[in-house]
Image (cartoon, grey):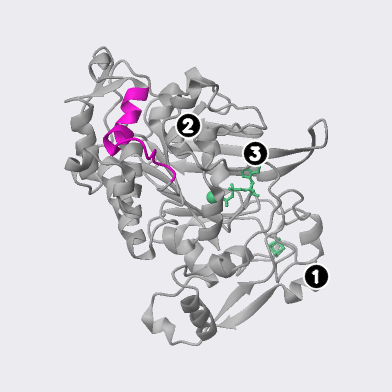
């Protein structure tokens, strides 16, 4: 579509402080949330991917990727979401951006139920909620110039920014620290970090309220990860954005998150503000994740401390362990952990935990004192020095989760068609609308939009 063809399209101002009301002629979902107010509310959210087999492709089971989670995101905050590979973080991100259709539960955005909105109903929301993908190599269409890529959201939404698309795209490029003159270059001419900046510029084009960033720096060189994270942080302040940032490594989200949700096998096991989570993690899994984060403080480096190293693989989400899903790897597990699922309860103000025997807190099942046999061997205390050695050997991937054995899950459905720059379509969700419903696909065929090459993800998660 040429820019001229968009004359009748809605105009939006070129500059934004992020707080302006939506331009007349466009609908926001239900009015703006003031800072601190709940922007997104998720209740009982589930996504089960069916596994089909046999001659008649009958459903023989399901991957319970997200299995009943509750949380909210407040306007202006950054919610970090962490957990080992395969625990359902990306699925959660795609559910809340409505790139996947939930199996059950409810998603409210600015007070409006958007759980099952169709294409038409989603249209205004597509402007307000954007996603940044993990892999800057596959998420940009190699055949399009970055001008076309960053300008695509305007074309898809039929929006003409003041001064025209080209001018606005060039402004966006300079906002993310790229040379506006490079408008006509192709993605392959840019480094990974620069490509991720292009992805960020595209996500910001329509001045979204909520940006969901799925491992935005995992695929990047360690040396430039901080630059990209800092850029996102600066943009948040400038534009009044709200972020959900997904990471497998706590070190990425620890400085930028206001609150952090820890996921394990499709569940949130702990949700707390950053300080509480770091200073007194209550869930054993959180403690193990934290324990594996390299300590940047030189004073503590020399100190004798030991860290917890989880043994064993993350169990399969096809048949997760009974009771507390972490009981097969938890060094505190007792019988009740095996039989009864702990609820996510606010044990301290602002700190929600799902555990029968939380750390540094009144035991929730004090009658149950006998450790499961497996618990005795569930974890290992490893002196810092040894961990540091192995971390150095494993460079550039430092940190924790990296040392935990990667998940071995049967991949029941063809998960990634990968080769196509599919993520771009996701950021431009109207694109698949031409070939079908983007957000409410048939169970077996999730939209190409939501798929990224998991292979590359897996390899960075190791
Ligand atoms: N389209 C799909 N079909 C079947 N299983 C899937 C699909 N997408 C993800 N999964 C499975 O769901 C689980 C959670 O995946 P994901 O959300 O990508 O986790 P994470 O982002 O935390 O690594 C994994 O076991 C994964 O194999
Ligand atoms: S103590 Fe029990 S409930 Fe708590 S994390 Fe360990 S296994 Fe789960
Ligand atoms: Mg993921």
Sequence order check, earlier mark of 1 and 2: 2
Element carrying mark 2: strand
> Is residue 338 left or right of 276 when viewed as pictured?
right
Asked if residue 149 is among those painted magenta in the image, a careful observer would answer yes
- Quadrant location of the N terminus? top left
Question: Residue 407, labelled with which disc?
Answer: none
Q: Position of residue 213 (x, y in %)?
A: 43, 46
The CA span between labels 1 and 2 is: 42 Å
Q: Report crowding for label 3: few under 14, some 14 to 19, many 20 or more residues within 10 A (C-alpha).
A: many
Dots 2, 3 in contact, CB < 8 A? no
Q: Nearer the viewer, residue 235 or 37?
A: 235
The image position of residue 43, as x and y in percent, is: 60, 38
Q: Residue at x 35, y 29 (%)?
A: 153
Cα distance between the residues tagged 2 and 3: 18 Å
Q: Magenta segment, which residues? A: 138-156
Q: Is residue 288 left or right of residue 149?
A: right
Mark 3 vs 1, N-terminal side: 3
Mark with earlier residue (2, 3): 3
Q: Residues within 10 Å of mark 2 (few under 14, many from 20)?
A: many
Residue drawn at x 20%, y 44% as measured from the top left: 174
Cβ of disc 3 within 8 Å of ligand 1? yes
Q: Which residue is mark 2?
A: 109
Local crowd at mark 1 within 10 Å, few (<14), some, or many (≥20)?
many
Q: Residue at x 44, y 75 (%)?
A: 295
Q: Mark 1 — residue?
A: 372
* Numbered disc in front, either 3 or 1: 3
């Amino acid at each position: 579509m040429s820019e001229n063809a968009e004359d009748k399209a809605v105009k939006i101002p070129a500059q934004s402080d992020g707080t302006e009301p939506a331009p007349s002629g466009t609908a926001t979902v239900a009015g703006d949330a003031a800072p601190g107010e709940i922007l997104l509310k998720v209740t009982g959210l589930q996504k089960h991917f069916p596994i089909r087999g046999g001659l008649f492709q009958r459903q023989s089971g399901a991957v319970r990727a997200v299995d009943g989670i509750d949380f909210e995101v407040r306007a202006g905050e950054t919610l970090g979401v962490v957990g080992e590979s395969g625990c359902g973080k990306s699925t959660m991100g795609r559910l809340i951006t409505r790139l996947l259709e939930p199996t059950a539960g409810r998603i409210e955005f600015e007070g409006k139920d958007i759980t099952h909105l169709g294409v038409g109903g989603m249209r205004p929301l597509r402007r307000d909620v954007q996603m940044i993908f993990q892999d800057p190599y596959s998420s940009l269409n190699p055949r399009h110039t970055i001008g076309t890529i960053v300008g695509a959201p305007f074309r898809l939404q039929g929006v003409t920014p003041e001064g025209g698309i080209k001018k606005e795209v060039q402004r966006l490029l300079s906002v993310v620290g790229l040379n506006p003159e490079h408008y006509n270059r192709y993605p392959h001419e840019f480094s990974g970090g620069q490509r991720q900046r292009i992805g960020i510029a595209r996500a910001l084009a329509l001045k979204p309220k909520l940006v969901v960033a799925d491992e935005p720096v995992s695929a990047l060189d360690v040396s430039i990860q901080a630059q990209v994270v800092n850029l996102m942080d600066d943009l948040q302040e400038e534009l009044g954005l709200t972020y959900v940032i997904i990471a497998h490594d706590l070190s990425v989200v620890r400085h930028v998150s206001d609150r952090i949700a820890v996921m394990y096998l499709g569940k949130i096991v702990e949700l707390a503000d950053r300080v509480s989570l770091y200073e007194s993690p209550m869930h054993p899994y959180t403690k193990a994740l934290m324990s594996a984060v390299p300590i940047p403080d030189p004073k503590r480096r020399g100190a004798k401390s030991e860290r917890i190293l989880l043994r064993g693989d993350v169990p399969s989400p096809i048949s997760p362990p009974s009771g507390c899903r972490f009981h097969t790897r938890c060094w505190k597990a007792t019988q009740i952990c095996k039989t009864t699922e702990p609820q996510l309860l606010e044990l301290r103000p602002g700190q929600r935990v799902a555990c029968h025997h939380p750390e540094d807190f009144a035991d929730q099942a004090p009658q149950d004192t006998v450790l499961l046999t497996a618990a005795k061997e569930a974890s290992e205390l490893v002196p810092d020095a040894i961990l540091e050695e192995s971390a150095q050997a494993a460079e550039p991937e430092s940190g924790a989760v990296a040392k935990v054995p990667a998940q071995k899950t049967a991949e029941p459905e063809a998960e990634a068609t990968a080769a196509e720059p599919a993520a771009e379509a996701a950021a431009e969700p109207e694109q698949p609308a031409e070939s079908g419903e983007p957000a409410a696909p048939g169970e077996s065929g999730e939209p190409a939009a939501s798929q990224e090459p998991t292979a590359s993800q897996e390899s960075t998660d190791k």
